[in-house]
Image: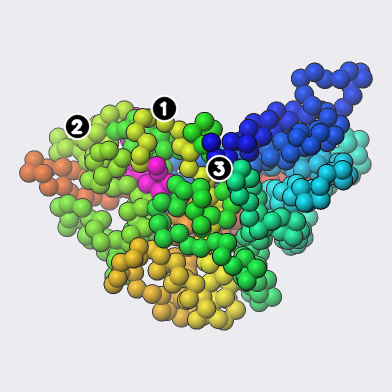
Amino acid sequence: MKHINILKSLCLGVLLGGMSSCDYLDIEPQDRFTENDVFSNLGLTKAYVQKHYVLPRNGWNQQALRFISDESMNNFSWYDAWTVNEGGLTPDQLGGLDIWSDYYANIKNCNVFFANAEALNQIDKKERDILIGEMTFFRAYYYMELINRFGGVVLATEPFALDDPTLFRERASYEECVEFVAGEFKKAADLLPVKFTGENYGRITRGAALAMRSRVLLYAASPLWNPTDDKTKWQEASDAAAAVFSEEMAGVYSLDPDYKGLFLNSHSSEIIYARLYNSEHGHQFDWENTPNGWSGYSATCVLQEMVDSYEMEDGSMPDPSLYAAARENPWKNRDPRFYASIVCDGQQFRDNQVDFWINEDGVSGGKDSEYGRDNWNYSKTHYTIRKFMDESMLKPWSDKGSHPWIYCRLAEIYLNYAEAQFHLGNEAVAREYVNKIRERARGGREGILPDVTESGEALLAKIQHERKIEMAFEEHRFYDVRRWKIAEQTDNGDVHGIKIVKKADGSKSYEIIKVQSRKFDASMHYLVPIPNYEIRKCPKLNQNPGYPQL
C-alpha cells in the first residue's frame, strides 16, 4: 500500500509524544522513550520527526476555519463556532481558534530535536539534512500559524528548564516573528530536496518550504500589517511566490486540469504540501459533511452569500431576484467551480438526488430536509459542501476517506504572485496569473468565464474575488478578509440560507431566509486574543488590543 511506511512511522511517532527527559529517582521509565533512547537510534529519531506530519490542523478537523468565515456556518456550533460568529470571542473563550498550547507544545518538541542535533552527525549527510530541514519547516509552520492568529508571539528556539530565569518572556513583534519564520522556511528549503518519490512521497519538499515562505510574506505585506503600503514588502512577497515556479523548480508543479478531482488525488501535479491518508488511517470528513439523507451530519452549511459569490458563466454576478422568479433550479449556468464545490437541491450527489425541499403542508419534505431522514442534522441553509467529497464512497461511517488534505497548491502561489504584482504596479502580470486560474476553471469550455481585463481598484477586487472562489473552504478566507482589513464588511450582519417548497404540481418556490446574525468588532477581532490561561502563567504577555486585560 502506498505511503504505508510513512504512516507506520507516524503511528510510532505519536508514541514518542510521551517521551521523558527526566531521571526521576533515577528510575528508567518503562512506558516511554527517553531523549537518549530517541536520539541514539536513527529509527526512533525519524519517527520523532515524522510524528509532526499529523500535528498541524487542517480542514478535516471540527475546528475548521470555514465555519467562522463568510463561507459557511457549522451545523452544530462545534468548538463554539456560533459564539465566535456572533462576536463572543474573548480571552477565556477562543473556541476552535485556540492553538496556543498545542502549537507551543509542538514547538517545544522541535526545540528538543535541535538541542540533540549533534547526535545526527553520525548519519549520512543527505539524510541528516532532510531531517533537520523537516523539523525546521515544521517549527516555522507552527510559528506562522500562531502569528497569523495572534500577531507577535514569544519566539523560543531552545528547550526550557523549569528553573530557567528566561522562561517567562515578552512577545516579539510581528515583524520580528515574520523575519524569523521567513528565514526558517528559507533555511528548510535549502536543506530539502525538490521532490520525493516512492515510499517517501508525501514528505516535506523544497517547494513546500518556499510556498509557506510565500504565504507568510504575502500576509506581512497586506494592509493589516503594512498600513503604509511599503513596496519593499510587496517585492519580497512577489519574489517569494516566484521562487516556487522559478527555473530551478520548472516542471515540478502544474495546474491540474481536473478542479474537482485534484482534491481526491494525492499525486495531483498541483499539490505542493499535503497530509496523506489511506483507507486504514482515513478520515470521516465525507460523512460529517454529507446531507442527512445519507446519514451524514451536514456539518458545513454553505451560506447563501457564498453561493451567490460564484459568477454566472458570462462573468456577471447572479441577480438575487432570480430566486423569487424561479420554479426550478435557480443555480443554472454558474462558474463550473460552483458545481464542484456546493451541493444544491435537485442535484445528483453520490448515488441519488438531493432533496432539501419541504412540502406545502410544512410538516413533511424530502429526505435531506428538516422532515427527512435523521432530521436533527439537516442543513440549516439547505446547502452543503461538495468540494473534497469522494462521491464513490457509499457506506456511511464505514468507508473512510483516503484523499489528502491539501495545505498548499500551485493555484494559491499564482494568486499570491498576482496580488503582489498588482501592488507593485505590474497590472498586466497580475491579470496574466489570475487568468491562468480562470482558464483552468473553464474546464476546456469556450465562451465562459471571460478573462479579467480590469485595472486599478477594480482589478484588485477581481483578484480578491478569484481567491475567494478558487480557494473556497481551504482555510484561506478567514485570514484573507483580515489581512485585507475587510472583515467588518464580510463578517458583520445577517447571513442567509434558502427555503425550498415543493408544490403539488412538482414546481418549487425559493425564498432567502436568515440563519444567523454575525458580529465583527474591528477594534479587536482582527486578532485572536491571547488565552487568559497563558497570561496567568506568564504575566509578561500583553493582551491584544481591545480585549480585557487581566
Is 387 one of the magenta-colored residues? yes
Name the foreground residue: 145 vs 73. 145
Query: SS for tag 2?
Result: loop
Q: Amino acid at mark 2?
A: Ser
**Up-down relation of residue 8 to residue 538 (above or below):** above
Mark 1 or mark 3: whose residue is earlier in sequence: 3
Mark 2 or mark 1: whose residue is earlier in sequence: 2
Q: Amino acid at mark 3?
A: Leu
Give the image location of residue 533, x and y in percent: 71, 36
Q: Is residue 478 visible?
A: no
Query: SS for tag 3?
Result: loop
Which residue is painted at 41% across and 75% down in the image? 452
Disc 1 to disc 3, C-alpha distance? 19 Å
Disc 2 to disc 3, C-alpha distance? 42 Å
**Up-down relation of residue 374 to residue 148 (above or below):** above
Crowding near the residue tagged with mark 1, few <14, some 14–19, many ≥20 C-alpha atoms within 10 Å: few
- Contact? badges 2 and 1 (CB < 8 Å): no
Q: Which residue is mark 2?
A: 364
Which residue is painted at 45% across and 59% down in the image? 256
Is 64 one of the magenta-colored residues? no
Crowding near the residue tagged with mark 3, few <14, some 14–19, many ≥20 C-alpha atoms within 10 Å: many
Which residue is painted at 55% across and 42% down in the image? 276
- Residues shaded magenta: 376-390
Mark 2 or mark 3: whose residue is earlier in sequence: 3
Q: Amino acid at mark 1?
A: Ser
Single out the residue that lies furthest toward the left: 505
Query: SS for tag 1?
Result: loop
Figure quadrant of residue 336:
bottom left
